[in-house]
């Protein structure tokens, strides 16, 4: 068991210290150059689009507002990991770490833009008539690697129970227990009911909830 732990620690350190940082920043610089610094050129257009309202698009097609789409994107990117990560970076690297986080964030905006464009290019309609998009689809339809899309979807599903839900629910329950002496089991039950009610309403309900919270 100890050998497995050491091996996993070695792989984790190598990935997060060298490989992933180099790949992520390399992609960010590449997208920035290929889009001619879209994150700076289109700031005015971005602000204008955030004012678009929800309603119906072409041919009566329902759509969510640009701000709702922004809120959903923000909800998936900002969480307890970001807060704890920033605090850890400042504690370990000093205030200068903030500057490099800003640089990474500005370059990373081009990567996020590229992901969104790919998602739109390779999206498809599901059985209910709505749109389905994401990396699993442009891996399958764009790269012709169905196995990679399936692997990505499977790993994301598994990760959502840990990074996507467990960490957030744990942070909420610990905070409420410490501040108001609320039992964690009660908080967990309420979170299940609230999230289930929202998700049962589909994309529109999720967008509306994210918009109100943001």
Image: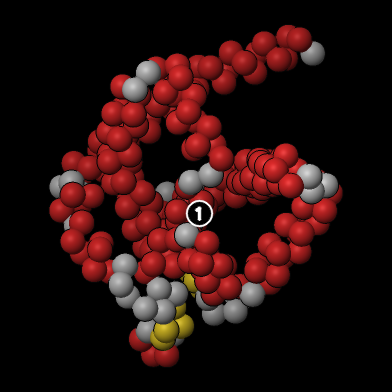
Instruction: Name the image quarter holding the N terminus.
Output: top right
Residue 117 x, y percent position in the rendering: 34, 58
- Residue at x-position 65% and y-position 67%: 199
Classify mark 1: helix, strand or loop: helix
| Residue corresponding to mark 1 | 75
Describe residue 162's horizontal placement relative to residue 130 as left or right: right
Residue 74 shows in the view: yes
Reply above or below: 45 against 140.
Answer: below
| Residue ID at (64%, 45%) | 168
Q: Is residue 159 above or below residue 9?
A: below
Q: Position of residue 63 (x, y in %)?
A: 44, 78
180 or 190: which is nearer to us? 180
Relative height, residue 5 to residue 72 (above, below): above
Residue 36 on image: x %, y %:
15, 47
1 sits to left or right of 131: right
The front one of 72 and 158 is 72
The structure residue drawn at horizontal position 70% and vertical position 43%, both measured from the top left corner, is 179
Q: Position of residue 65 (x, y in %)?
A: 40, 73
């Amino acid at each position: 068991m100890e050998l497995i732990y050491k091996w996993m620690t070695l792989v984790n350190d190598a990935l997060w210290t060298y490989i992933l940082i180099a790949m992520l920043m390399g992609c960010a610089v590449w997208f920035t150059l290929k889009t001619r610094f879209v994150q700076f050129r289109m700031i005015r257009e971005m602000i204008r689009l955030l004012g678009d309202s929800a309603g119906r698009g072409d041919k009566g097609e329902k759509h969510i507002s640009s701000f709702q789409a922004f809120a959903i994107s923000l909800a998936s990117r900002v969480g307890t990991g970001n807060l704890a990560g920033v605090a850890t970076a400042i504690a370990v690297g000093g205030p200068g770490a903030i500057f490099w986080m800003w640089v990474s964030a500005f370059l990373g905006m081009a990567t996020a833009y590229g992901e969104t464009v790919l998602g739109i290019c390779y999206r498809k309609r599901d059985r209910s008539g709505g749109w389905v998009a994401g990396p699993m689809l442009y891996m399958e339809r764009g790269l012709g690697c169905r196995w990679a899309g399936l692997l990505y979807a499977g790993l994301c599903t598994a990760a959502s129970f840990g990074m996507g839900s467990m960490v957030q629910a744990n942070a909420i329950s610990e905070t409420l227990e410490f501040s108001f002496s609320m039992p964690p089991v009660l908080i967990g039950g309420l979170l299940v009911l609230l999230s289930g009610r929202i998700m049962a309403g589909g994309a529109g309900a999720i967008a509306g909830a994210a918009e109100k919270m943001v």
